[in-house]
Image (tube, grey):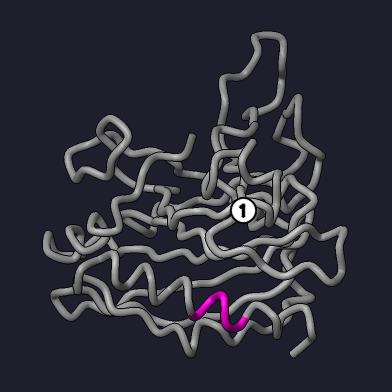
């Protein structure tokens, strides 16, 4: 494990323990497993860990924790090809192509920590960090491409706040990345949003976030467990 990853071990565990407490017993996380990030040279992001979350009804679901360096992202070309995509405000990178999320009923991101990537000695600030959500946007009439993509929102802290780095303290925040939404809240009867999407670190920050997802056959009790994190729709 690199020194960059090592200094995130305790913040990851501390943040996940807090989210577990905020769920009021509805979700049990595994902070020890989640903090063991491993480098991912084959992926367009820096590092990752895979652990499990246990919901109130006993359902065990994936908890993926990802460390994003600047320009790190989760996209790939499995859903769209670059030749078929138009964008006006994003780099033309495969890593920014939105991914199909039809395999999950809902997914929520948890802000873990972040620090200024330009300062090698900077320590992570709990719950800091903002990540862009890249998705489908309206296509201009004169564009011949199959689809248009762009930033459709942000997860984590409000964008302007996150740019101030470690001089601020932040509250834990959960954000909806995919799922049925009514208003700005997760609601089983709401309109599906965030499918497809990719997550993109557009700032000069090293950002860590966790993602917990539900399968389509999840019970209403399991869905309520996810709602217990009080996730909001990306801004």
Say which residue label 1 marks: 129
**Percent coordinates x, y for residue 180 in the rendering:** 28, 42
Using the rendered view, name the quadrant where residue 46 is placed. Answer: bottom right
Residue 3 pos. (x, y %): 79, 85
Residue 132, position in %: x, y? 62, 43
Give how far across and how far down residue 51 sits, in percent: 45, 82
Instruction: Tell me if mark 1 has few (under 14), some (14-19) or many (20+) residues whose alpha carbon lies within 10 angstroms of its own.
Output: many
Instruction: Provide the secondary structure element on which disc 1 rests.
Output: loop
Q: Residue at x 86, y 62 (%)?
A: 119
* Dominant SS type (magenta): helix
Q: Relative to 113, does residue 93 appear above or below in the rendering?
A: above
Q: Nearer the viewer, residue 21 or 152?
A: 21
Write the residue at 39% across / 56% down. Answer: 107
User: Is residue 59 within the magenta segment?
Assistant: no
Highlighted range, magenta:
9-13
Q: Is residue 12 magenta?
A: yes
- Please name the residue shown 71% across and 35% down the image: 84
Q: Residue at x 61, y 48 (%)?
A: 130
| Depth order, front residue of 107/111 | 111
């Amino acid at each position: 494990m690199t020194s960059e990853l090592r200094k995130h071990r305790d913040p990851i565990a501390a943040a996940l323990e807090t989210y577990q407490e905020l769920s009021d017993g509805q979700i049990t996380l595994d902070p020890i497993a989640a903090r063991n990030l491993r480098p991912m040279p084959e992926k367009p992001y820096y590092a990752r860990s895979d652990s499990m979350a246990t919901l109130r009804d006993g359902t065990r679901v994936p908890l993926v924790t990802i460390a994003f360096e600047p320009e790190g992202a989760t996209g790939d070309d499995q859903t769209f090809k670059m030749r078929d995509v138009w964008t006006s405000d994003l780099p033309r990178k495969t890593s920014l192509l939105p991914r199909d999320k039809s395999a999950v009923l809902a997914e929520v991101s948890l802000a873990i920590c972040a620090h200024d990537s330009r300062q090698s000695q900077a320590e992570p600030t709990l719950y800091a960090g903002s990540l862009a959500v890249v998705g489908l946007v309206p296509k201009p009439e004169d564009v011949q491409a199959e689809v248009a993509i762009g930033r459709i929102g942000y997860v984590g802290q409000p964008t302007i706040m996150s740019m101030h780095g470690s001089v601020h303290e932040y509250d834990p925040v959960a954000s909806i990345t995919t799922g049925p939404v009514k208003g700005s809240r997760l609601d089983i009867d709401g309109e599906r949003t965030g499918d497809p999407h990719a997550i993109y670190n557009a700032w000069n920050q090293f950002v860590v976030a966790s993602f917990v997802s539900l399968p389509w056959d999840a019970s209403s009790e399991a869905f309520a467990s996810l709602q217990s994190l009080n996730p909001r729709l990306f801004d």
